[in-house]
């Protein structure tokens, strides 16, 4: 709104009329410019619904992506009880490094439970372990096997077995690695306590075993990795009331 200075007498009345006219004109000009701005915005921002072809293509693309995702995440899972299902999520570089740090000084046979694309198995085999990766997803097993072929890793250093690790006897392994899910760690702990020898070491990535004292841990947050010595865990649990080991 324009500023109207105060004047006196008839000159004042004339001046007031002039001011009112000015203000009215200013108001119309402002409304006109708002209309122009809104029209301009209408040209830039879409005001109508997307074209049906675009919607159909977006729907098809999302369905395709979901199909590819579920192909990688779910095959082989049908027979695993719902509460024990663990989806595929590759471990980070730091997680792999942390796992290898916690295996320093160890040798022998190593089982990776749910080996995914084989990254932990390849890291451990290059450190001298004789590794087996147990994986339920056939696509990931095929990928890891072909990677072993391309990179010339012999089967005596790294094998990939398409098998449910819950149904696998792990008693011949003295090193076990597991990057799974928090909900399965308790059940896995019971299985490992039944099967592994006293001198076995278990490495848990990200999710620790409930009620197990860890020997050491490396990293923090999502990359934290825990080492457990089965002999120590057994003697600790023997001293816990109502615990059968
Ligand atoms: C979180 S991912 C970890 C993958 C890999 N170890 C890594 O660190 O990148 C867990 C893997 O376990 C596999 N898995 C889940 N349940 C399994 C089962 N019962 N037997 C074998 N593999 C299983 C999944 O298919 C998935 O590839």
Image (cartoon, rainbow, N blue to C red):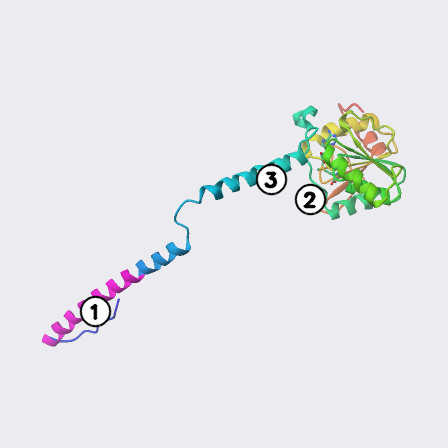
Please state which of residues 54 and 143 is positioned toward the viewer in this rendering. 54
Residue 117 within the magenta-colored segment of the rendering: no
Label 3, label 2: how far apart the Cα atoms are: 26 Å
Return the disc, 3 or 2, that comes first in the chain's sequence.
3
Residue 22 within the magenta-colored segment of the rendering: yes
- Read off the magenta span: 10-33
Residue identified by numbered label 2: 222
Tag 2, which secondary structure? helix
Return the disc, 1 or 3, that comes first in the chain's sequence.
1
Name the residue: 69% across, 45% down.
221
Which numbered marker is on residue 172?
none
Label 1, label 2: how far apart the Cα atoms are: 67 Å
Q: Is residue 17 left or right of residue 100?
A: left
Q: Does the residue at mark 3 contact the one at mark 2 (Cβ under 8 Å)?
A: no
Q: Position of residue 10 (x, y in %)?
A: 9, 75
Please state which of residues 43 and 20 is positioned toward the viewer in this rendering. 43
Mark 2 surroundings within 10 Å by alpha-carbon count, few (fewer than 14), some (14 through 19), many (20 or more): few
Q: Main secondary structure of the magenta part?
A: helix
- Whether residue 239 is visible, yes or no, is no
Q: Is mark 3 within 8 Å of ligand 1?
A: no
Q: Is residue 114 left or right of residue 155?
A: left
Residue identified by numbered label 1: 22
Q: Is residue 164 above or below residue 148?
A: above
Q: Quadrant of ligand 1?
A: top right
Q: Single out the mark in the foreground, 1 or 2.
A: 1
Quadrant (top left/top right/bottom left/bottom right) for the C terminus? top right
Residue identified by numbered label 3: 65
Mark 3 surroundings within 10 Å by alpha-carbon count, few (fewer than 14), some (14 through 19), many (20 or more): few
Q: Position of residue 200 (x, y in %)?
A: 86, 34
Return the disc, 1 or 2, that comes first in the chain's sequence.
1
Tag 1, which secondary structure? helix
């Amino acid at each position: 709104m324009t500023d109207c200075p105060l004047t006196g007498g008839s000159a004042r009345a004339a001046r007031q009329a002039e001011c009112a006219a000015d203000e009215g004109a200013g108001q119309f000009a402002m409304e006109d410019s708002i209309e122009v701005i809104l029209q301009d915005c209408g040209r830039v921002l879409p005001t109508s619904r997307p074209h049906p072809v675009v919607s159909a293509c977006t729907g098809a693309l999302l369905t395709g992506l979901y199909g590819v995702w579920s192909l990688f995440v779910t095959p082989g899972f049908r027979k695993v009880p719902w509460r024990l299902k663990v989806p595929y999520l590759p471990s980070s570089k730091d997680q792999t490094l942390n796992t290898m740090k916690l295996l320093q000084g160890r040798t022998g046979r190593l089982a990776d439970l749910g080996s995914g694309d084989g990254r932990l198995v390849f890291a451990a085999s290059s450190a001298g372990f004789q590794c087996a990766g147990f994986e339920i997803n056939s696509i990931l097993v095929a990928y890891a096997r072909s990677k072993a072929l391309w990179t010339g890793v012999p089967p005596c250093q790294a094998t990939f077995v398409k098998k449910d690790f819950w149904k696998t006897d792990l008693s011949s392994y003295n090193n076990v690695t597991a990057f799974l899910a928090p909900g399965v760690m308790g059940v896995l702990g019971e299985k490992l306590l039944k099967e592994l020898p006293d001198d076995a070491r278990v490495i848990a990535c990200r999710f620790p075993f409930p009620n197990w004292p860890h020997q050491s841990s490396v990293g923090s947050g999502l990359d934290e990795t825990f080492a457990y010595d089965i002999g120590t865990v057994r003697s600790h649990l023997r001293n816990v009331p109502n615990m059968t080991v």
